[in-house]
Image: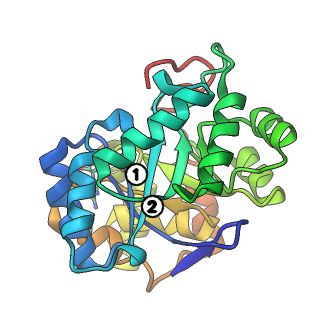
């Protein structure tokens, strides 16, 4: 099950998120995920677990070319030269020759270096160190700016997305511009969303778990969810979502759940 990125490369429909895991947790989780059939793994320089993720990918029986590895440039490495070095450092920690997808983790508009950073990303793609390049937590004007200045569009924008924060306008804009939506915190970080009465009602109706219902919502929106789990049963559960569907009415009920943002605000976020 893949989606096609605008640069012609396929990407798995669902992956494993690895925040917050340390190197050892990440190594174990990614090893298990690959054995369950996951083929997309998401990490970031800022997570501090690229060594663990890379070790699992390198140790796995699955060929490297069958695994789609995403990492992200941390905020301290914005700028043209710094981004080139940041990628080299990530590849060194991962123990890989290339990543499948490299993302600018946050736009950090206050520093206004994301366009120079994107120029470096274009070069990294040309050099084959990043097979595909994209962004995370970007707004449409920020994406239009980097595309306008380089002629190269990001293939994907990884954003906070879950029932309660459906990002309808941004997703529609992505679809109009050929940008894939990838969902971080797809389960809304867990328990509150998974205990919601609408989510639990739909889970009972389908004989599924609340997490499976929420992940199905992402898939039917056309988004790529990357649920984090360090638990082997929940990891298996989160991958078993390709054999049932929600009705349009059920999708609309999940779209309408109240909630809001739970993670960082892209306009002000400066940490990573
Ligand atoms: P755990 O790692 O113990 O499974 P998100 O991906 O939205 O950030 O959510 C991650 C949180 O949701 C983690 O706390 C994770 O805990 C929990 N989680 C992941 N999968 C499931 C599931 N299938 N059921 C319940 N909780 C889950």
- The residue that appears at 40% across and 51% down in the rendered structure is 187
- The residue that appears at 24% across and 66% down in the rendered structure is 58
Depicted 140 relative to depicted 194: above or below: above
Residue 100: image location, x then y, percent: 50, 62
Name the residue nearer the viewer: 144 or 165.
144
Image-based side of 55 in relation to 19, left or right: left
Tell me where residue 41 sits by quadrant. Answer: bottom left
According to the image, what is the colour scheme of the structure?
Answer: rainbow
Label 2 element class? helix
Tell which circle, 1 or 2, labels the residue nearer the N-terminal end: 1
Name the residue nearer the viewer: 27 or 215.
27
Is the residue marked 1 within 8 Å of ligand 1, measured from its CB?
Answer: yes
Disc 1 marks which residue? Answer: 187
Are there few (<14), some (14-19), or many (20+) residues within 10 Å of tag 2?
many
Q: Which mark is residue 214?
A: 2
Number of marks drawn: 2
- The residue that appears at 57% across and 67% down in the rendered structure is 250
Residue 246: image location, x then y, percent: 54, 75
Is the residue marked 2 within 8 Å of ligand 1, measured from its CB?
Answer: no
Residue reaching furthest to the front: 127
| Callout 1 touching callout 2 (CB < 8 Å) | yes
């Amino acid at each position: 099950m893949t989606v096609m990125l605008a640069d012609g490369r396929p990407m798995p429909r669902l992956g494993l998120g690895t925040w917050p895991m340390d190197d050892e947790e990440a190594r174990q989780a990614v090893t298990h995920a690959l054995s369950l059939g996951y083929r997309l793994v998401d990490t970031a320089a800022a997570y501090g677990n690229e060594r663990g993720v890379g070790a699992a990918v390198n140790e796995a029986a699955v060929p490297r070319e069958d695994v789609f590895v995403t990492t992200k440039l941390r905020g301290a490495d914005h700028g043209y030269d710094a981004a080139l070095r940041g990628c080299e450092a990530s590849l060194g920690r991962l123990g890989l020759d290339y990543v499948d997808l490299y993302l600018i983790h946050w736009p950090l508009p206050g520093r206004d270096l994301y366009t120079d950073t994107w120029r470096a990303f274009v070069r990294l793609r040309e050099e084959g160190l990043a097979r595909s390049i994209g962004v995370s937590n970007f707004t449409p004007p920020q994406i239009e700016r980097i595309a306008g200045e380089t002629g190269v569009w990001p293939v994907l924008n990884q954003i906070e997305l879950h029932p309660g924060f459906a990002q309808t306008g941004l997703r529609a804009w992505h679809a109009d511009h050929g940008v894939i939506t990838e969902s971080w915190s797809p389960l809304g970080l867990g328990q509150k969303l998974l205990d919601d009465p609408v989510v639990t009602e739909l889970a009972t109706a389908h004989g599924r778990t609340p997490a499976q219902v929420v992940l199905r919502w992402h898939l039917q929106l056309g988004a790529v969810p990357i649920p984090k789990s360090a638990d082997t049963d929940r990891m298996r559960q989160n991958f078993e979502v390709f054999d049932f569907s929600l009705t349009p009415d059920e999708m609309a009920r999940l779209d309408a759940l109240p909630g809001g943002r739970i993670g960082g605000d892209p306009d002000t976020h400066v940490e990573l």
